[in-house]
Image (tube, rainbow, N blue to C red):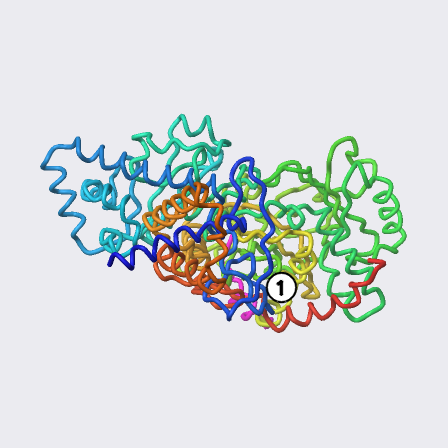
């Protein structure tokens, strides 16, 4: 055993090589070092999302960026160990009866739970036992001397932030995680909220209670959910298996002007070819006041029948005007006179789909849900359920109804002003056989209505799937890869009388309100399938602490007098890679991160990319790789 420990100490000293190479993210004020290229003995089982490329031969070191830089390691180590001590001190002050009850609870079969604020988890209940072993654990850093971690309950933590204006989001996320089990919520105290942008360690705070640190400290949650993409996230300080529900540059997809710019670019590249019509998926769109002159020109051409992007009945020249940054139908108007345009403030003007598909005389659009787990390369899923949103008055282009929002706008918030489903036939919004949804029905119900009228559900769904894939394909190069991110998007699609699907807009943070039984059913199922698909990996914080302490100790010794010797270079590349894999096996409890293209548990999600259709589109990129582009 003595010889074994001596050998282990030599390995710990050799860990300086890892730190010298700059593995992991840099701490505050640190600068990342470029890793020297080495030849690996073979592929590794650990594949970080950052290096999960479709054609990757996997000769790069695994989980690059997964373990922190030197100062960040010290900060994380202090936080983890301090929280364990704080939890132990808190437990030791409790009455013996409570401690006995907690100890008994810890021996029960493992079962996930979503703890409410102030409720102690099984990990906290066993903290007194962990404290009694803490001193020996600090002295002996070998994995074999930590039996407590083998019996720790597997718990994942969620951090819900920036949703004060949208309590329905918090409610749905909490309810979903409670149903799934195995989740607890990390909450900020007032001090944390004041320091939400600082990466400082306050691990000795008793309020930590053994739970992961919040935004003011090293971030140890598994999942962060926020309503807005503007919530600040220190992506460089995250472990690669932590997940955040936004991409920093998703506006390339969700801003109409940027999305149309990407689509127009592809249309120019493929002009005259068979691929050009693929990117004709959005009505002609202009951003005011910047593109006012271009809009006036297009409006004049449409008056003469030359605007052919969306055919309209003879003598009709309708455009829809929407204020930038508004939602729930606020400020949307239909116009047929250029003098009605407001060009002194940011507006979106879009050619109106004047001949939509109707069901029993009522106009509708589709709200579809798409989740993207990677943009480079693209990995995306389309949810098989969603909503058809109806107007509550029959559709008409009569001049006296042009400004009637209940005839032309399908937005649920607009239609609810009339009094839910007033005027809409029961079979369109729900009755005894179908969940009530005010002016909405489910996609499943819509497909039944179409089949009853002799229309093909399969053909329409195929066109819709292609539309979504084309939109994602057009922006994939403009949204940088972010291994920690995923995002749920709301696609609004209109189908015209010729069964052509048109993309109206893409919404970031689509509404998650559950005001009706249909909302609760579909959005609840959506969230459960989404969390299951993303599956933020559980990780062992005790194992992470031991790795950080070991490397910190090795780094301290390496900087002593004996560090003049090149000990850090004596460990072979293969041994260093094996050590990293051993570390990751312990930290991730033996779980393998899902590789790109590997099918996860996805419920009703249908994979759009990678797929044969996506591969065909990727082959179209070859003519775009020219110096002129």
Task: Specify the principal SS of the magenta part.
Answer: helix
> Which picture quadrant has residue 5?
bottom left
Q: In the displayed structure, does residue 561 sit left or right of residue 488?
A: left
Which quadrant, please, contains the N terminus?
Answer: bottom left
Q: Nearer the viewer, residue 530 or 74?
A: 74
Q: Quadrant of the C terminus?
A: bottom right
- With 327 as the anchor, is 271 left or right in this view? right
Residue 559 % position (x, y): 46, 42
Q: Residue at x 61, y 57 (%)?
A: 375
Task: Report whether 86 appears left or right of 340.
Answer: left
Which picture quadrant has residue 139?
Answer: top left
Mark 1 lies on residue:
464
Q: State whether residue 279 is above or below residue 261.
A: below
Residue range (magenta): 440-455
Is residue 451 magenta-colored? yes
The picture places residue 376, in percent across and down from the top left corner, at 62, 58
Q: Secondary structure at mark 1?
A: helix
Closest to the observer, 454 or 609: 609
Residue 304 showing in the rendered view:
yes
Quick one: label 1, few (<14), some, or many (20+) residues within 10 Å? Answer: many
Q: Position of residue 389 (x, y in %)?
A: 56, 52
Asked where in the image residue 282 lies, by quadrant, the reply is bottom right
Q: Is residue 230 above or below residue 25?
A: above
Q: Is residue 476 above or below residue 609?
A: above
The percent position of residue 470, horizontal first and vertical second, equals: 67, 62
* Residue at 44 percent of width and 41 percent of height: 561
Any part of residue 435 in sight: no
Q: Nearer the viewer, residue 216 or 445?
A: 216
Q: Count all numbered tags in the image, as a single digit.
A: 1
Residue 315 part of the magenta segment? no
């Amino acid at each position: 055993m003595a010889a074994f420990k001596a050998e282990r100490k030599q390995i710990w000293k050799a860990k300086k090589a890892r730190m010298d190479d700059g593995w992991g993210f840099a701490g505050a004020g640190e600068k990342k070092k470029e890793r020297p290229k080495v030849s690996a003995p073979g592929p590794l089982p650990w594949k970080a999302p950052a290096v999960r490329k479709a054609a990757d031969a996997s000769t790069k070191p695994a989980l690059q960026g997964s373990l922190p830089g030197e100062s960040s390691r010290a900060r994380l180590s202090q936080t983890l160990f301090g929280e364990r001590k704080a939890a132990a001190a808190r437990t030791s002050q409790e009455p013996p009866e409570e401690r006995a009850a907690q100890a008994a609870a810890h021996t029960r079969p493992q079962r996930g739970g979503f703890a409410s604020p102030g409720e102690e988890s099984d990990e906290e209940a066993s903290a007194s036992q962990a404290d009694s072993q803490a001193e020996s654990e600090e002295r002996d850093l070998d994995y074999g001397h930590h039996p407590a971690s083998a019996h720790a309950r597997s718990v994942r933590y969620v951090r819900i932030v920036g949703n004060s204006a949208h309590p329905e989001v918090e409610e749905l996320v909490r309810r979903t995680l409670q149903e799934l089990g195995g989740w607890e919520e990390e909450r900020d105290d007032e001090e944390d909220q004041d320091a939400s942008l600082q990466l400082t360690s306050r691990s000795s705070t008793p309020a930590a209670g053994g739970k992961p640190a919040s935004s003011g400290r090293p971030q140890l949650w598994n999942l962060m959910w926020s309503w807005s993409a503007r919530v600040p996230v220190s992506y460089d300080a995250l472990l690669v298996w932590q997940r955040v529900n936004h991409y920093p540059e998703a506006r390339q997809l969700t801003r109409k002007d940027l999305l149309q710019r990407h689509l127009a670019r592809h249309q120019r590249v493929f002009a005259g070819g068979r691929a050009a019509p693929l990117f004709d998926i959005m009505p002609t769109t202009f951003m005011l006041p910047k593109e006012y002159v271009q809009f006036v020109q297009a409006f004049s051409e449409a008056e003469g029948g030359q605007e052919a992007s969306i055919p309209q009945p003879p003598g009709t020249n309708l455009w829809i005007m929407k204020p930038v940054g508004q939602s729930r139908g606020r400020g949307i108007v239909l116009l047929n006179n250029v003098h009605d345009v407001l060009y002194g403030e940011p507006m979106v003007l879009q050619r109106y789909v004047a001949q939509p598909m109707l069901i029993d005389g009522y106009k509708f659009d589709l709200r579809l849900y798409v989740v993207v787990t990677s943009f480079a390369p693209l990995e995306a899923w389309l949810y098989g359920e969603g909503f058809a949103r109806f107007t509550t008055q029959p559709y008409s282009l009569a001049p006296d109804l042009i400004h009637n929002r209940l005839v032309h706008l399908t937005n649920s918030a607009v239609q609810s002003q009339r009094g839910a489903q007033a005027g809409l036939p029961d079979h369109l919004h729900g009755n005894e056989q179908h969940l009530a949804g005010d002016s909405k029905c489910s996609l499943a119900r819509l497909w039944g209505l179409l089949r009853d009228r002799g229309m093909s559900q399969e053909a329409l769904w195929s066109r819709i799937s292609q539309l979504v894939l084309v939109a994602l394909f057009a922006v994939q190069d403009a949204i940088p890869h972010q291994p920690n991110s995923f995002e749920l998007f709301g696609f609004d699609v209109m189908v015209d009388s010729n069964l052509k699907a048109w993309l109206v807009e893409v919404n970031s943070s689509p509404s998650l309100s559950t005001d009706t039984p249909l909302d609760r059913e579909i959005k609840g199922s959506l969230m459960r399938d989404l969390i299951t698909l993303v599956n933020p990996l559980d990780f062992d914080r005790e194992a992470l602490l031991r790795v950080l302490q070991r490397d910190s100790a090795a780094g301290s010794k390496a900087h002593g007098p004996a560090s003049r010797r090149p000990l850090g270079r004596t460990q072979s590349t293969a041994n260093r890679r094996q050590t990293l894999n051993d570390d990751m096996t312990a930290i991730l409890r033996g779980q393998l991160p899902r590789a790109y293209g590997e099918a996860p548990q996805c419920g009703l999600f249908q994979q759009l990319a990678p797929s044969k259709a996506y591969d065909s589109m990727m082959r179209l990129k070859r003519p775009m790789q020219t110096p002129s582009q």
